[in-house]
Structure formats: C-alpha cells, structure tokens
Image (tube, helix red, strand yellow):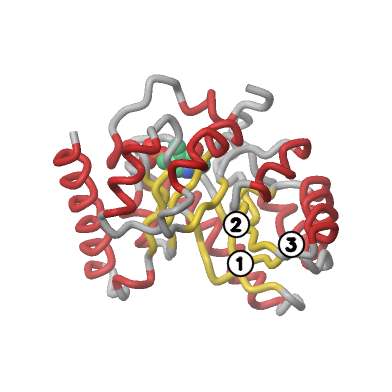
Amino acid sequence: MKENLLHNLKIINQRIKNACIRTGRNVDEVKLLLATKTVSAERIKIALENGETLIAENKVQELKEKYEDLKNIPHENHFIGHLQTNKIKDILKYDVSCVQSVDRLELAEKLHQRLLTEGRTMDIFIQVNTSNEESKFGIHPDLAIDLVKKVAELNSLRIRGLMTIGLFSAETEKVRACFKILKNLQQEIIRQNIPDVEVKELSMGMSGDLETAIEEGSTMVRVGTAVFGERIYPDSYYWDEGK
Ligand SMILES: *Cc1c(COP(=O)(O)O)cnc(C)c1O
C-alpha cells in the first residue's frame, strides 16, 4: 500500500514536470496540492513524510477528524469544498491557511468578521464556475471581478488567486476552454490593478486534466484519485451543500 502511494506520487510529480517542460515553464511554478477527501490520516502522513507539503479537504468534518494525527507534521492545509458560514469557526480552529472556495460575498464577509474577532488574516482564492454546470459551486465568470473588488475591501482577507473545477469531459478542448476563462479573468484583474489584490495563483487541474491546466497557466494542481486511488462516493457528494 505504501509502495503504491509513493509510486503514484512519483508519477504525478513526473507528469507535472513533463507538462512544464513541454510548455516551457519552470517546474517550480506549479505546486502539487493533494486533495485528501476520504483518505485516512495514516496515508496522508506517508505523503507528507515523502516530501509533500500541501493538502486540502472538502469537508470540515474530515478536517476535524484528521487534525490531531497530522498537526505535528509540517504542512499547509487549504480548504477546497463548499463552505457553509456556520463552519467558519472550525476552519480557523483547525489551522486552514487558505480557503480556495470563496464564491460569494456573504461567505467572505462572515469569514472577515470572524478573522477580525481573532485578530488574524487569511489567504483566499475566489472560486469561479467556468463550466457553467449547476452542480458546481463558484461565482459566474461575469460576476467574478465584481466579487473580487468587494472582497478586496475586507482587509483581513488577502486574495491570492482564482480556483476552478474544469468541465468533466473527455473532450480536451472543452476542458481547456474552462481554464482559459480563469486565465483571462486573472489577466483582466491584473490589468485593472485593483488595490490589495494579487492574483498570482491559478488553482486548476485535477488527476485527469492537469496537463491541459498547466498548458493554460495553472500554478497549482489539485490531485486526489491519481495519488490515492478511486473514491467510493461520487464527487457531487463532496460538492453538495449540507452533507
Ligand atoms: C476531489 C477534488 C479534487 C481532486 O480530484 P481528483 O479527480 O480526485 O484528482 C480537486 N479539486 C476539488 C475541489 C476536489 O473536490
């Protein structure tokens, strides 16, 4: 089991490297984030002990369950699932350093208020729905820049980038179109030079489409299945509200 995991990690890192080389990018421009939903703390530990440093959960419940087992191993923890405002306290309690799934002003405002109370700041990404699928969270691309401007005024939140989940499709060009939307938004935000906004990071690309995402400018690929194996639940389970 351990050999398998280490083998998978090696292959993923090689895929990232190959995609970078092929597209003329530096290998260190693209970070690997391990999407650890349903993965036991024990297996996550193996990855962290093997040099990985960045993990992310979709559910606050899982974050909580694995916290004790992982807290003494140096790593960075992001949150990539749909976040209900009543769980914000837990996100802070369990040392999440970045919420990548900020997709509405109400969430940003509540997060900001809580951070103010605790005298802290936090990195966030704005999640954009680039595939136009109702099942996916994220702000509509046409509304994204307006949200960025409003969130930028909340001074305990530092916008560091944009995140998207590409279309699930075997047609590469349709998936690519999603990533292009995110890249174009980034360019437009940079062009508008919005105070306190730095959108260096583009979190896009997963097990099946990371090469396309890297070709389109991804700086962070989020990989689960290709490292840890298939999950029992469909992804929609992790994206649905209230489960
Ligand atoms: C599960 C998940 C991933 C990783 O997906 P895989 O296809 O398993 O690599 C990436 N991003 C989000 C938001 C996820 O929920």
Q: Report, in whole angstroms, how far the alpha carbon at label 2 lies from the one at label 1.
A: 9 Å
Residue 2 appears at what percent x and percent y? 19, 39
Q: Residues within 10 Å of mark 1 (few under 14, many from 20)?
A: some
Where residue 148 is drawn, which disc sits there?
3
| Amino acid type for the residue under numbered disc 1 | Arg
Query: Ligand 1 within 8 A of label 1's CB?
Result: no
Quadrant into which the C terminus falls: top right
Q: Tell which circle, 3 or 2, labels the residue nearer the N-terminal end.
A: 2
Across and down, in percent, residue 75 comes to 44, 58
Nearer mark to the viewer, of 2 and 1? 2
Say few, some or many: other residues with alpha carbon within 10 Å of mark 3 (under 14 / 14 to 19 / 20 or more): many
The answer to whether the residue labelled 2 contacts the one labelled 1, judged by CB atoms less than 8 Å apart, is: yes
Q: Nearer the viewer, mark 3 or mark 2?
A: 2
Report which residue position mark 2 lands on. Answer: 98
Res 174 seen here: no
Q: Residue flagged by tag 3: what amino acid is it?
A: Val
